[in-house]
Image (cartoon, rainbow, N blue to C red):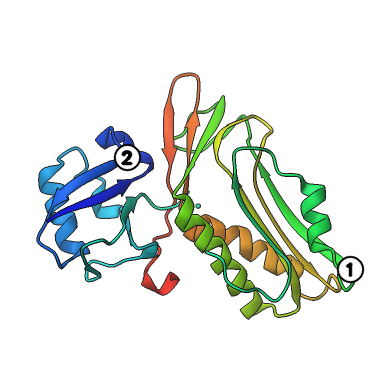
Amino acid sequence: MQLEIRLFATLKERAQQDRLQVNIPLPSTVGALIETLAAEQPALAPLLPIAIVAVNKTFASAQTPIQAGDEVAIFPPVSGGSQATPYPTYFALTPTAPDLNAIHAHLTQADVGAVVSFTGSVRGQTRRDGLPAQTLYLEYEAYQDMAEVKMAQIAREIWERWPTVKGIAIVQRIGRLDIGDITTYVACAAGHRDQGVFDAARYGIDRLKEIVPVWKKEVGPDATVWVEGQYRPTEADN
């Protein structure tokens, strides 16, 4: 049976398309799919051993079953659905600059006396091995449907660890971003500054970089490089 595979970032570029049709007997497993894909798509074969696979927007292992009609996505390690939440939240994947004052106002309820936030921006000099010494701009790409699910998951994880947190915002920019543009924004609100908001905001941005499927491309004067992380999500991260 023919199965459609969605590709992102370096895999999409290597395949020169964002979707592939693979003939594989179903039901099957992720491991069998990767073997078939490596044989049929030699250009992708070097990337597949470190690639992440998601089935129906959840991280998968080699043993994860695949059925007809499943949504399968393959992507490199991250560079980086709604459920009821006890306090205000704001999640966004957006090509436009976020209105930080409006987000702050959304989190600031009558019982909130502290909002701690992290704001990331594009820097012009990277100075990291393998990347252009000078950055002209970044391009961000996301597996949007899954990214929104994972942002909500991060919020739930924060509330499990810091139940005194009263509001959470997570914003990831996508598309082309120039020097100085905001890339990410994470904020946590609480009644007081000593109720976990500093640690919660730090956890939020770190977790965003681990499990939200977003990738960036560094574009310099002489080189263009996809930036990939080291963290490999597993089914335990679902």
The answer to which quarter of the image holds residue 105 is: bottom right
Quarter of the N terminus within the rendering: bottom left
What number is the disc on residue 139? none
Find residue 95 and report its horizontal and vertical position in percent: 60, 38
Reply above or below: 9 against 133: below
Reply above or below: 189 against 137: below
User: Which residue does the image show at 50% across and 56% down from the upper left?
Assistant: 147
Q: Amino acid under label 1?
A: Gly
Q: Which residue is mark 2?
A: 18
**Foreground of the two, 128 or 23:** 23
Q: Is residue 115 left or right of residue 152?
A: right
Q: Dot 1, how many residues are within 10 Å of its Cα: few (below 14), some (14-19), or many (20+)? A: few
Q: CA distance from mark 2 to mark 1?
A: 46 Å
User: Which residue does the image show at 56% across and 24% down from the upper left?
Assistant: 136
Q: Is residue 51 left or right of residue 43?
A: right
Q: Is residue 135 visible?
A: no
Q: Amino acid under label 2?
A: Asp
The answer to which quarter of the image holds residue 189 is: bottom right
Find residue 6 and report its horizontal and vertical position in percent: 31, 48
User: Which residue does the image show at 45% across and 57% down from the upper left?
Assistant: 146
Q: Which residue is mark 1?
A: 113
The answer to which quarter of the image holds residue 134 is: top right
Reply above or below: 146 against 178: below
Determine whether the residue tagged by mark 1 lies in a helix, strand or loop: loop
Find residue 59 and report its horizontal and vertical position in percent: 37, 65
* Farthest front residue in view: 69
